[in-house]
Image (spheres, helix red, strand yellow):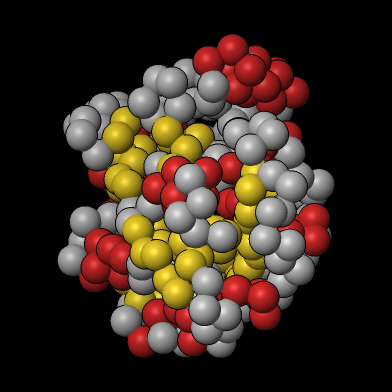
Amino acid sequence: MRSKLTLGAAAFAVLALTACGGPAGTTSSEAPEESTDSGSSTEHPYGLEVAEAPEFEEGTTMAELSEAGAITIGTKFDQPLFGLVGPDGAPEGFDVAVGSLIAAELGIPFESIEWTETVSANRETFIENGTVDLVAATYTINDARKEVIDFAGPYYEAGQALMVQAGNPEGLTGPDDVAGLAVCSVEGSTPAARIVDEYGAELQATDAYSNCLDPLRNGQVVAVTTDNVILAGFVDQNAGEFELVNDGETFTEEPYGIGLTKGDDAFRDWINDVLDEAVADGTMAELWEQTAGTVLPTPEFPATDRY
């Protein structure tokens, strides 16, 4: 059964995001609530319908998660618009909404999702050791990562950009200008490796992009680099302090995917089906407009890559 947004539920979601900063769910420090009814009467914070008694082939990951009535999803906790912990302690944003869409199709209500913080350096590890069932965390699909995990998607395509102090005191015009200069990014991320290997920057590495903000404010680094959508969220959240170089012009393509256990082809194909249908019926656009779309224009969503 498709997880579609209803007018009433969508209105509820808008009110929830406006009044309390976003949806509530469980975090890794809390035990997920036991669900006795996959079609919970609780309004879904993103306006999604939770599938009632979905049927899956026995032995598949879909069947196991659906029967358990709970799922653990890794996401970022420090990235405005995509994965940011709200005032109620639960993450909110586009990645969170996409993760909850997958859960809803499994018949798992939002309150039975356990959200676990995944930073760039531990995403593959958490998937490999079973800490999470999947990861939706601004997770760029690349060949090196596909050696150890699998990806469904992409469901969005971002691009690397540069964020500087408001007024751009160094006069940066693009990545070619940062050779030999200190730039902050997250250790283990694609942007961090690229800004060093391809553009010769001196990397100031950290474990979370939010930890790059003070070094930029204090002039310890000339720029922060990661995907344009993440940086746009920080600019919006810290009005008047930062800006994007060349209005956020990107110099890479960063397709975001859902990370899952390598070799679980049935689960990957099923998630791809969910993502493609959500694009086709407008659900993905609705989820975007409730989250990242409060700042960024609605994009053209990519078709999934059935590798």
Residue 238: x and y in percent read 60, 34
Q: Residue at x 45, y 27 (%)?
A: 86
Q: Residue at x 40, y 48 (%)?
A: 211
Residue 172: x and y in percent read 71, 65
Q: Residue at x 81, y 47 (%)?
A: 297
Closest to the observer: 78 or 103? 78
In the picture shown, does residue 142 fall above or below 234?
below
Q: Residue at x 60, y 74 (%)?
A: 178
- Quarter of the image that includes the C terminus: bottom right
Closest to the observer: 276 or 189? 189
Residue extending furthest top? 19
- Horizontally, residue 292 falls left or right of residue 225, namely right
Residue 229: x and y in percent read 65, 53
In the picture shown, does residue 295 fall above or below 127?
above
Q: State the image quarter where residue 250 is shown.
A: bottom right
- Horizontally, residue 236 falls left or right of residue 125, namely right
Residue 136: x and y in percent read 46, 55
- Looking at the rendered structure, the number of numbered marks drawn on it comes to 0
Q: State the image quarter where residue 2 is shown.
A: top right
Closest to the observer: 86 or 270? 86
Is there any visible trace of residue 136 in the rendered image? Answer: no
Is there any visible trace of residue 144 in the rendered image? Answer: yes
- Quarter of the image that includes the N terminus: top right
